[in-house]
Amino acid sequence: MSVSAVIPGSFDPVTMGHLDIIGRAATRFDAVVVAVLTNPGKDPLFSVDERVDLVARATAHLPNVSIDTFEGLLVHFCHARDIRVICKGLRAVSDFEYELQMAQMNQRMGDVETLFLTTSPEYSYLSSSLIKEIARFGGPLEGVVPDLVRDALHARFGPPPDR
Ligand code: PNS
């Protein structure tokens, strides 16, 4: 039996934390679909096409990972592709309450189970929001996003000043 999982998110932009989860999931599932939310509530920095392109290039070395987009309910996306597993990273206790709520609701609405991977400790403090703030004010991005995302952030905000 082949088992696929969906890894959903805004990916605005994809971080090393996301890539850690995607890479590890790719070793445990036959296929992983990264599902990029097209209409996140917050005004995204990158368009959906840009976010998809960054994820696609950052995961190009993983043959069983594909990228797709979705809007509306995640369980509808899962059903349309006959996928019954959502895989997510858990960074800290602060993630837990909201993730638990969504996992239980998705299980109830769609018989879709959420399996959590604990984020690798070196990435447990990363978030796309923090990274955008650091990029906006010219802070260092080495090691927290792949080089291609760093370049995209520099193109958006301008290169960091010489210090
Ligand atoms: O990267 P994010 O923004 O933290 O990801 C959140 C995401 C996209 C996983 C979550 O908002 C989501 O699943 N949205 C789709 C809408 C939906 O299904 N809502 C009901 C959840 S129970």
Image (tube, rainbow, N blue to C red):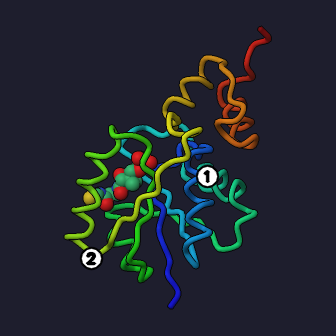
Residue 72, quarter of the rendered image = bottom left
- What amino acid is labelled 2 in the image? Asp
**Furthest residue in direction front, as rendered:** 121
- Left or right, 135 with respect to 93, comes to right
The correct choice, above or below, for 160 with respect to 70 in the image is: above
Q: Position of residue 73 (x, y in %)?
A: 31, 64
Residue 65 falls left or right of residue 1: right
Q: Label 2 neighbourhood size at 10 Å, few (<14), some (14-19), many (20+)? A: some
Query: Any mark on residue 117, and which?
Result: none
Q: Residue 19: which numbered mark, if any?
A: 1
Cβ of mark 2 under 8 Å from ligand 1: the answer is no
Tell which circle, 2 or 1, labels the residue nearer the N-terminal end.
1
Residue located at (27% from left, 76% from top): 111
Is residue 112 rendered to the left or right of residue 70? left
Q: Amino acid at mark 1?
A: Leu
Which type of secondary structure does the marked residue at label 1 adopt? helix
Q: Could you tell me which residue is drawn at 38 percent across and 77 percent down?
A: 84
Q: CA distance from mark 2 to mark 1?
A: 26 Å
Q: Tag 2's secondary structure?
A: loop
Q: Which mark is residue 111?
A: 2
Residue at image x 50%, y 91%?
1
